[in-house]
Image (cartoon, rainbow, N blue to C red):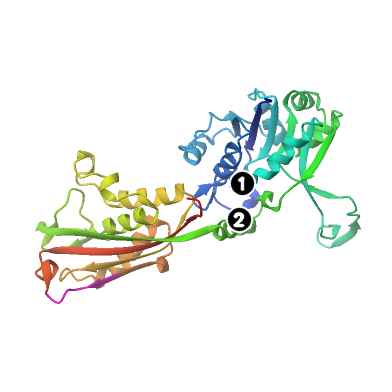
Amino acid sequence: MVSTAALIVAAGSGSRAGSGPPKQYRRLGGKAVLRHAFEALAGHEAIGEVRIVIAAGQEDLFREAMAGAGAAEPVAGGAERSISVALGLEAVTAERVLIHDAARPFCPPAVVDRLLGALEAHPAAVPALPVADTLARGAATLGEPIDRAGAVRVQTPQAFETAAIRAAYAAWRGDFPTDDSTVARAAGLEVALVEGDEALAKLTWPGDFEAAERRLAAALVGRTGLGFDVHAFAPGDGLWLGGVHIAHDRGLSGHSDADVALHAITDALLGAIGEGDIGDHFPPSDPRWRGAASSRFVEHARALVEARGGRIDHVDVTLICEAPRIGPHRAAMRSRIAALLGLAGTRVSVKATTTERLGFTGRGEGIAAQAVATVRLPEDS
């Protein structure tokens, strides 16, 4: 069987995409753009290895984006895309290679199938789509129209016999090309065209990221999780609630900081994604969590949602106690919880009630909290 590798070029600066990190490291649906591109190719049964080319100084961004993905050590790229491709090709040992831009995070398996099928009869193949819009030259004003007859939009990944494209790059003497098929054609290679896909649209401008988020959101399904927690009062001069320290004549008893609100939220998030409960992830028998800030538990649950390609839509928490009064601290709690979850404050609700002096909370023996979290996950997650 002919071996196949994928080479993802992720060494650009992405300056046109707006402020923030380079676009390949910006997040879509909780994952870096690069990780989406990697998982799309690594998940194809015909692709045996995936190598990634990154720019110098982006090592930490790479490690954060690809943590747990099983990616090989990255290849150091160059100042231009074509230099990065040539350097990446040196690390490829497979007989066939698909060269792909990290800025095209959604690669349908069917496109890979078509490309590899075309390589059975050609040394190179690229996906392309017809041009439907009117084309014209222009700067400040509209110029002459350009004949679009026979024009196509060329996409990536582009597929090659590895030895052929490596030799083509070695022989290239022109300016820096932005496309691998240009180098292949200059070396005399016949490049087959296969049907591309709108999903392969390149992320270039800020609006492209908004469209990509909408695309991901359309493929998510809603799930709801419920959390409940109780902590008894204990001697102290204050307590943590909703990530906010409140002065009080007593504290709360617990292995961690006993933030009953954040514990309930953590359980709600874990329940929504079917990941057990807070005790499974932070067992009270483990001394590492003695006195730990409960914000760590919430951030852990949030990271699990994001790792599954999900997003948190809303969190609603109700505190049940006679004292302390929650009203003066509600806004600060909402703000803190929203920050921990990466949400707008309008997507977090904090409420309080009493039990009319009934039960352990009514007797002032402790505080209870219940929380509901709404998340969206990929349908097969």
Q: Earlier in the sequence, mark 2 or mark 1?
A: 1
What residue is shown with label 2?
Answer: 212
Q: Can residue 176 be seen by looking at this rendering?
A: no
Residue 41, above or below 252: above
Left or right placement of residue 328 versus residue 376 in this view? left
Is residue 356 on the magenta stretch? yes
Measured in 3D between alpha carbons, the distance from the residue under mark 2 to the one under mark 1, in whole angstroms, is 9 Å
Specify the amino acid type for callout 1.
Pro
Image coordinates for residue 377, horizontal then vertical, percent: 48, 55
Q: Residue at x 28, y 59 (%)?
A: 264
Residue at 88% from the left image edge and 54% from the top image edge: 148
Answer above or below: position of 68 versus 236.
Answer: above
From the top left corner, tell me how far across and down residue 67 is, in percent.
46, 38
Q: Determine if the magenta segment contains residue 298.
A: no
Label 2 is placed on what type of residue?
Answer: Ala
**Disc 1: which residue:** 105
Q: Give neighbour class at mark 2: few <14, some 14-19, many 20+ (Cα, 10 Å).
A: some
**Which residues lie in the magenta part?**
351-357
Is residue 87 left or right of 62 when viewed as pictured? right
Q: Give me the residue at 31% from left, 58% from top.
A: 265
The N terminus - image quarter: top right
Q: Quadrant of residue 93?
A: top right
Q: Is residue 73 above or below residue 178?
A: above
Dot 1: element: loop
Dots 2 and 1: beta carbons under 8 Å? yes
Q: In the drawing, what numbered circle is on residue 11? A: none
Mark 1 burial class by Cα count in 10 Å: few <14, some 14-19, many 20+: many
Evaluate whether residue 194 shows in this view. yes
Instruction: Name the residue furthest bottom.
Output: 356
Q: Residue at x 29, y 69 (%)?
A: 330
Residue 192 in the image: x percent, y percent?
A: 82, 38
